[in-house]
């Protein structure tokens, strides 16, 4: 497997620290508002990275934090006139709802910054003791000039960041590029006691502390959007090197920007969309397809044409699946012939090459074509369908086939299933367990999952 490493600016062979295991950290949301469709790209990118690593047999520990202490939350709290902690709770809940709707798998750990204050204070103290940090009027700053390696991730030089028109000069700092580790609180702001007085930790410190606690001093992959590379990730890395002399992560992955109809997304241009708004119009698989149709590092343009194309592509997958007796897709019934190994190989090679999902999707298209092709034998079409579902699931598609496909079943088939279900419920009512079991087995043999509920038998396709 090869991964493009932002740190070295090249694709490198992926070697995990511990064979068979991958420790992955991707920056999560700052919970001050509903997240936008650009954030959704980052969440989906690392969801797919995680899913694919798992498919390749790695035991993945995936940490995605929740930043629930940050200046933006304070600003939003003032704007909505709701207490700080309620804003954080409100948008944490919204975040969890929206990622669930997007169909991302819950991370292994989802730490909140507010649960780590003591460790953050300890880290800042350590930086101060080692001479990398200084206190100034209750704030604590990291002194970038003390660390010769500073700028290695983003390629930015501290000389480029002299105070000027674009950077507001902060007289408390020794150098304009020095960044905040601890911020003294103003009256009414959330605050914690510290050796420097009441205040709160800076965002860059939060991620170092949470990743270190859950993944160790150096872990395998650190991910996030390109917009986080500087200053956020550069500053995370600086604190790690200053305290341990070791890198924070061996591979740094950054997903590309998202534009809207060719323009940068911004509230002032009125082209700002939350994931929630988009999910009300397009389903999660369409959105997932849209993002995966481009390589994760390329910029992507969110335009109507491309998202409509993604919608059509998903419809095409489902119509090909519904063209066969897809109820029999469950594992035992269909064998995938050796001649189909080439599909899996092409798919894996594409994803092994720095997660080239666009190429991997082309394999799914080919398989969908085989499923639909009426010239093929039924067994071939079934096998192609099974492989389509299997590989699609690696990318996070087809997680609930029944949801999409039940309505495509022939009415006679549904009538047949319903008759069996009624007979079974009748048998159960009469405590005729033998008949009830026989009818259940008949339903299972059709490729259905059967559940007993207080309202009777419930079925769904596997
Ligand atoms: Zn972070």
Image: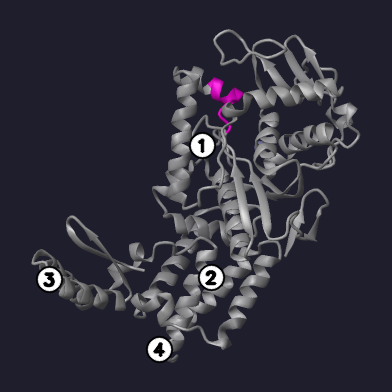
Query: Residue 441's x, y, as percent?
Result: 26, 76
**Distance Cα–Cα, label 3 vs label 2:** 42 Å
Residue 127 higher or lower than 213, as above or below: above
In the picture, measured across the screen, residue 96 lies left or right of residue 359, that is left
Q: Would you name the residue on which mark 3 appears?
A: 432
Query: Residue 254's x, y, as percent?
Result: 69, 49
In the picture, measured across the screen, residue 37 lies left or right of residue 200, that is left
Ligand 1 quadrant in view: top right
Pick the front one: 3 or 432: 432
For marks 3 and 2 on the same chain, the one whose residue lies earlier in the sequence: 2
Q: Disc 3 or disc 4, which is closer to the eye?
A: 3
For marks 4 and 2 on the same chain, the one whose residue lies earlier in the sequence: 4
Q: Is mark 1 within 8 Å of ligand 1?
A: no
Q: Would you name the residue on which mark 1 appears?
A: 270
Pick the front one: 231 or 428: 428
Image quadrant in which you'd find residue 16? bottom right
Q: Would you name the residue on which mark 2 appears?
A: 391
Residue 105 higher or lower than 361, as above or below: above
For marks 1 and 2 on the same chain, the one whose residue lies earlier in the sequence: 1
Query: Residue 342's x, y, as percent?
Result: 62, 82
* Residues marked 3 and 4 touching at CB (< 8 Å): no
Q: Which residues are magenta?
A: 67-75
Image quadrant in which you'd find residue 168? top right
Q: Disc 1 or disc 3, which is closer to the eye?
A: 3
At numbered mark 4, what does the secondary structure look like: helix, strand or loop? helix
Asked if residue 444 is among those painted magenta in the image, a careful observer would answer: no
Work out whether residue 82 can be spotted. Answer: yes
**Distance Cα–Cα, label 4 vs label 1:** 51 Å
In the picture, measured across the screen, residue 293 lies left or right of residue 176, that is left
For marks 3 and 4 on the same chain, the one whose residue lies earlier in the sequence: 4
């Amino acid at each position: 497997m090869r991964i493009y490493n932002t740190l070295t600016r090249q694709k490198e062979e992926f070697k995990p620290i511990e064979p068979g295991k991958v420790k992955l950290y991707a920056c999560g949301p700052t919970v001050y508002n509903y997240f936008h469709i650009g954030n959704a790209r980052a969440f989906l990118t690392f969801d797919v990275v995680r899913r694919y690593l798992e498919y390749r047999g790695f035991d993945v520990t995936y940490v995605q934090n929740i930043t629930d202490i940050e200046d933006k939350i304070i600003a939003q709290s003032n704007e909505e006139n709701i207490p700080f902690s309620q804003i954080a709770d409100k948008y944490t809940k919204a975040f969890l709802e929206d990622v669930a709707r997007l169909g991302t798998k819950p991370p292994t750990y989802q730490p909140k910054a507010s649960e780590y204050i003591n460790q953050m204070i300890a880290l800042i103290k350590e930086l101060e003791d080692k001479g990398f940090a200084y206190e100034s009027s209750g704030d604590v700053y990291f002194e970038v000039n003390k660390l010769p390696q500073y700028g290695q991730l983003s390629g930015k030089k501290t000389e480029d960041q002299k105070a000027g028109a674009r950077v507001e000069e902060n007289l408390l700092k020794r150098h304009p590029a020095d960044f905040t580790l601890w911020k003294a609180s103003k009256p009414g702001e959330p605050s914690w006691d510290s050796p420097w007085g009441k205040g709160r930790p800076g965002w860059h410190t939060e991620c170092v502390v949470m990743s270190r606690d859950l993944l160790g001093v150096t872990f395998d992959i650190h991910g996030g959007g390109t917009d986080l590379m500087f200053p956020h990730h550069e500053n995370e890395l600086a604190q790690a090197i200053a305290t341990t002399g070791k890198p924070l992560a061996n591979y740094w992955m950054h997903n590309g920007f998202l534009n809207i109809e060719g323009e940068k997304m911004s509230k002032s241009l009125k082209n700002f969309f939350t994931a929630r708004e988009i999910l009300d119009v397009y389903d999660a698989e369409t959105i997932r397809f849209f993002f995966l149709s481009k390589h994760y590092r390329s910029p992507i343009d969110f335009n109507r044409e491309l998202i409509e194309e993604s919608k059509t592509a998903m419809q095409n997958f489902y119509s090909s699946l519904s063209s066969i007796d897809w109820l029999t897709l469950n594992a035992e019934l269909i064998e995938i012939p050796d001649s189909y190994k080439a599909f899996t190989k092409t798919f894996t090679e594409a994803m092994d090459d720095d997660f080239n999902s666009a190429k991997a999707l082309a394999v799914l298209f080919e398989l969908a074509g085989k499923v639909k092709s009426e010239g093929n034998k039924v067994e071939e079409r079934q096998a192609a369908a099974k492989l389509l579902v299997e590989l699609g699931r690696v990318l996070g598609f087809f997680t609930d086939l029944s949801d999409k496909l039940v309505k495509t079943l022939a009415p006679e088939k549904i009538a047949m299933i319903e008759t069996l279900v009624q007979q079974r419920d009748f048998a159960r009512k009469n405590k005729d367990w033998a008949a009830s079991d026989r009818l259940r087995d008949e339903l299972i043999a059709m490729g259905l999952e059967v559940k007993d509920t207080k309202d009777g038998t419930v079925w769904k396709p596997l």
